[in-house]
Image (cartoon, rainbow, N blue to C red):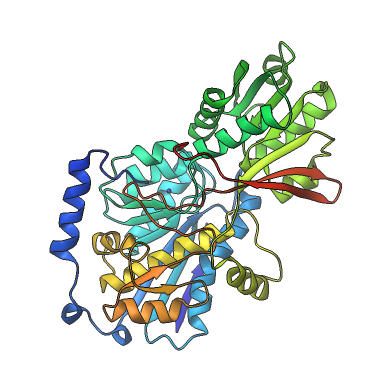
């Protein structure tokens, strides 16, 4: 049986950057992992996990897909013969740093040992540092892409199933020259870690002249000045980085006032249904977004569509994978205790064991709870967590916007060593 609730006022980890830290972590695994004899029977357990995801703010439009993805494992298990109970609760991050921290603290106070989230990079960074890591609660973000999470000293408590932004930057930079013959470019990015890091990574990867890296405030009443500054010098390509709430009026202003033949690229945060509904994209508008290419993607899409009556959107599969790994690690740990779950996150995704995919979570939890080795293979990707907690896919869809939505032009893999 499964208990679910969605409260209205409804992210990585370094591990330790040094090799010595990684060795210490491995030592902890060998010393403290529960043995089969110590594990309580699953029939006596309730596996608990929460989610800190946006139901309001700049990512409200994307939040429904993320919440659905995080909820689906609990729904799947509710309809199974799993001997354990599952309890799930969602708190609204409000797409703000304060909102993410407050939401995480609420779940922590209610003794949830593991959290899917947060969604935005800035909120995830602060949530982990100010709430989950100090409380020794595991977090796994489905959509925070900032490279900063890979070098965060998190004591092994934070993970993500989204790819790092440096990969997206490399793809966009390569497409700019190879497909669009751009010799010059400019970036226009929303202030914050996500925008700053992606703009910088693109500029470092672009094989041409970067004329401007211009930021804009999400509180701006007008985007005309920022756009004018970014387009000074007539760059061949403009790369806009942001989220829907502020990206929509910015793109509307661009098309009303400034479009002058340059190629427009938008970041993954702006490849959203609400943006497409609100912005009249003209020709030469493109994007690159993480591709969901895991072996369990077909099964996930089938379950998602049957439950919600729609195709999953961007990062929906990553959200499912985040929740699935937290549940499997909880079962393997044998207790609702963050440190024990953290020690199992890599164990259930790396190495030998019975392969478990979306749709097979009940079997995976039963096996993990009995002390058997399992290997989760996800919907978004293989989900093999490395020493920094990164486990997202490394393939991207190159797409363009059309009158009927968007069209995928190609699927690309960044060169090895790009991250």
Residue drawn 26% across and 74% down?
A: 334
**Quadrant where the C terminus lies?**
top left
Is 31 rendered above or below residue 288? below
Residue found at the far right of this picture: 403
**Quadrant where the N terminus lies?**
bottom left
Residue drawn 29% across and 85% down?
A: 44
Residue drawn 46% across and 80% down?
A: 2
Could one spot residue 333 in this view of the protein? yes
Pinpoint residue 100: horizontal percent, then vertical percent.
Answer: 45, 48
Pinpoint residue 238: horizontal percent, then vertical percent.
Answer: 70, 25
In the image shown, does 410 or 348 lie closer to the viewer? 410
Left or right of 209 in this view: 363 = left
In the image shown, does 184 or 102 lie closer to the viewer? 184
Pinpoint residue 260: horizontal percent, then vertical percent.
Answer: 83, 21
Count the labels in the image. Answer: 0
Pinpoint residue 199: horizontal percent, then vertical percent.
Answer: 56, 27
Could one spot residue 221 in this view of the protein? no
Is 334 rendered above or below residue 245? below
Is 394 rendered above or below residue 300? above
Residue found at the far left of this picture: 31
Q: Quadrant of residue 39?
A: bottom left
Residue found at the far top of this picture: 233
In the image shown, does 256 or 290 lie closer to the viewer? 290
Q: Quadrant of residue 190?
A: top right
């Amino acid at each position: 049986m499964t208990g679910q609730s969605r409260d209205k006022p409804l992210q990585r980890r370094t591990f330790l950057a040094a090799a010595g830290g990684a060795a210490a972590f491995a030592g902890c695994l060998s010393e403290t992992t529960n043995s089969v004899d110590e594990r309580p029977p699953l029939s006596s357990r309730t596996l608990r996990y929460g989610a800190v995801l946006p139901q309001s703010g700049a990512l409200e439009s994307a939040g429904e897909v993320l919440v659905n993805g995080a909820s689906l494992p609990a729904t799947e298990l509710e309809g199974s013969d799993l001997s354990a109970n599952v309890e799930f609760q969602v708190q609204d991050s409000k797409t703000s740093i304060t909102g993410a921290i407050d939401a995480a603290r609420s779940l922590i106070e209610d003794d949830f040992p593991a959290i899917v989230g947060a969604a935005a990079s800035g909120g995830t960074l602060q949530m982990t540092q100010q709430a989950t890591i100090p409380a020794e609660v595991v977090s796994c973000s489905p959509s925070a892409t900032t490279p900063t999470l890979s070098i965060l000293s998190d004591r092994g408590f934070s993970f993500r199933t989204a790819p790092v932004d440096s990969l997206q930057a490399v793809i966009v930079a390569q497409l700019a020259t190879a497909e669009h013959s751009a010799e010059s470019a400019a970036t226009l990015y929303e202030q914050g870690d996500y925008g700053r890091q992606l703009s910088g990574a693109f500029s470092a990867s672009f094989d041409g002249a970067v004329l401007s890296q211009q930021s804009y405030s999400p509180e701006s009443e007008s985007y005309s000045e920022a756009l004018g500054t970014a387009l000074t010098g007539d760059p061949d390509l403009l790369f806009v980085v942001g989220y829907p709430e502020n990206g929509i009026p910015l793109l509307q202003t661009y098309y009303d006032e400034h479009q002058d033949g340059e190629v427009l690229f938008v970041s993954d945060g702006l490849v959203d249904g609400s943006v497409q509904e609100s912005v009249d994209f003209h020709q030469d508008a493109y994007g690159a977004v993480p591709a969901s290419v895991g072996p369990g993607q077909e099964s996930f899409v089938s379950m998602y569509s049957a439950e919600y009556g729609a195709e999953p959107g961007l990062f929906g599969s990553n959200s499912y994978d985040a929740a699935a790994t937290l549940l499997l690690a909880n079962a393997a740990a044998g207790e609702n205790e963050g440190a024990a779950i953290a020690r199992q996150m890599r164990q259930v995704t790396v190495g030998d064991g019975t392969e478990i995919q979306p749709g097979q979570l009940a079997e995976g939890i039963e096996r993990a709870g009995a002390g058997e080795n399992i290997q989760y293979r996800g919907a978004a990707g293989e989900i093999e967590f490395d020493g920094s907690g990164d486990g997202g896919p490394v393939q991207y869809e190159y797409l363009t916007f059309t009158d009927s939505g968007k069209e995928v032009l190609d699927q690309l893999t960044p060169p090895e060593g790009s991250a």
